[in-house]
């Protein structure tokens, strides 16, 4: 334990803890029984503003029909829901008067590619000041039933009649650091005598299929106390949501230090700082406001990292597969 005392002593003087947060999305309650996850919003879905224009556009890579049948006539409705609200999909507020008609979609993995939905700045400026989460509902034209939905990770903020896309949310915390955008974890090199028990090994994460039926939702916070060698994961209206009708297998929640920002990437590499066990979740339910406390037993090599929260699920072979990820804020600098 002398190694830990030496390694983290300087850190405990600079800062007692670190807290970073990620604004996430809304909580969906009472999912309709018409939801069919075999109609999938695949790939990247993002919001952009057309240059020199008051028109905004939501672009999606693909909308795929994984069933064996051709769909009914389909269309997309767009809503702007106050962020972090709990809502029923049939009672969403702030519907935009623009409907994107898609047509029928054959089954067996056939896709609509480069799907787009437009809206105007006047649609946003008619709302109250605040933060909003765009929600797309995929519906059948003949019945109006909701087939599936997409909660966009991009957020819209309206402040003093100005529109911001994906504005960062800062959560005030008791922290003292010498540079606001850089966190010094240690100024000393790793001791060569450190055993493998306390060193972490580089790895890669495939995040291409994350955030489908099992999601981290709400605002999550990560607090690391380098003096006591403890970590705490909690949040504000945070939850782990199981959108599948089946219960999950065993779960693990990881804090991962990535060499890359996960935004728009399908694979990253870096180091796992810690993981905690999570109990299985029943179908169409969620664990609300979970809090996890654990000890630090690993060290991260020197470098610049993006901390991310990763939820994994055990498969039939005993391996853990990534199910959801959250970017936990600014870059860490470890020296």
Image: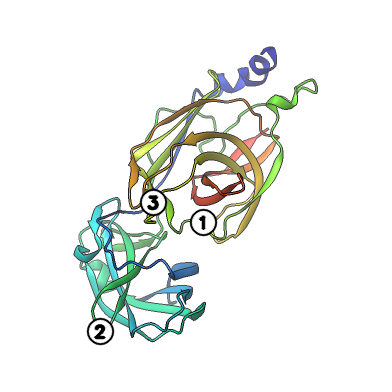
Above/below status of 92 relative to 325: below
Q: Earlier in the sequence, mark 2 or mark 3?
A: 2
Q: Nearer the viewer, mark 3 or mark 1?
A: 3
Q: In the orientation shown, which residue stands out farthest toward the top? A: 2
Q: CA distance from mark 3 to mark 1?
A: 13 Å
Residue under pointer 3: 242
**In this picture, residue 44 sits left or right of residue 34:** right
Above/below status of 97 relative to 236: below
Mark 2 and mark 3 in contact? Answer it, CB < 8 Å: no
Q: Is residue 305 visible?
A: yes
**Label 3's element?**
strand
Residue under pointer 1: 210
Q: Earlier in the sequence, mark 3 or mark 1?
A: 1
Residue 258 x %, y %: 62, 46
Q: Earlier in the sequence, mark 2 or mark 1?
A: 2
The residue located at (25%, 63%) in the rendering is: 89
Q: In the orientation shown, which residue stands out farthest toward the right? A: 192
Q: In the orientation shown, which residue stands out farthest toward the front? A: 316
User: Badge 2: how crowded within 10 Å, few (<14), some, or many (20+)?
Assistant: few
Residue under pointer 2: 142
Residue 254 x %, y %: 54, 39
Q: Is residue 181 visible?
A: no
As drawn, the label of residue 195 is none
Q: Quadrant of residue 190?
A: top right
Above/below status of 305 relative to 54: above
The residue located at (62%, 20%) in the rendering is: 8
Nearer the observer, 200 or 280: 280
**Label 1's element?**
loop
Residue 202 x %, y %: 71, 42
The residue located at (43%, 81%) in the rendering is: 69
The residue located at (39%, 51%) in the rendering is: 242
Q: Quadrant of the C terminus?
A: top right
């Amino acid at each position: 334990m002398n190694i830990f005392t030496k390694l983290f002593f300087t850190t405990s003087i600079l800062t007692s803890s670190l807290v970073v947060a990620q604004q996430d999305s809304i909580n969906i309650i009472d999912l309709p029984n018409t939801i069919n996850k075999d109609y999938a919003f695949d790939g990247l879905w993002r919001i952009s503003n057309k240059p020199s224009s008051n028109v905004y556009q939501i672009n999606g890579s693909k909308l795929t029909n994984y069933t064996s049948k051709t769909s009914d006539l389909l269309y997309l409705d767009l809503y702007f829901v106050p962020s972090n609200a709990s809502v029923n999909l049939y009672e969403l507020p702030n519907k935009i008067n623009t409907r994107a008609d898609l047509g029928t979609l054959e089954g067996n993995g056939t896709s609509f590619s480069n799907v787009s939905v437009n809206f105007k700045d006047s649609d946003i400026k008619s709302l109250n000041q605040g933060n909003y989460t765009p929600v797309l509902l995929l519906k059948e034209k003949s019945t109006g039933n909701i087939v599936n939905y997409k909660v966009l990770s991009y957020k819209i903020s309206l402040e003093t009649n100005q529109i911001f896309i994906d504005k960062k949310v800062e959560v005030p915390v008791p922290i003292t650091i010498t540079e606001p955008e850089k966190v010094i974890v240690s100024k000393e090199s790793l001791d060569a005598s450190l055993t493998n028990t306390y060193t972490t090994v580089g790895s890669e994460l495939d995040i291409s299929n994350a955030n489908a039926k099992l999601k981290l939702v709400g605002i999550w916070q990560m607090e690391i106390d380098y003096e006591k060698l403890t970590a705490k994961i909690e949040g504000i209206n945070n939850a782990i949501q199981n959108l599948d009708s089946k219960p999950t297998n065993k779960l693990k929640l990881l804090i991962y230090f990535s060499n890359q920002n996960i935004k728009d990437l399908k694979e990253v590499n870096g180091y796992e700082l810690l993981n905690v066990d999570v109990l299985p979740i029943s179908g169409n339910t969620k664990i609300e406001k979970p809090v996890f406390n654990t000890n630090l037993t690993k060290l991260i090599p020197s470098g610049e990292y993006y901390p991310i929260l990763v939820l994994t699920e055990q498969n039939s072979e005993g391996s853990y597969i990534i199910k959801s990820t959250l970017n936990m804020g600014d870059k860490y600098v470890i020296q």
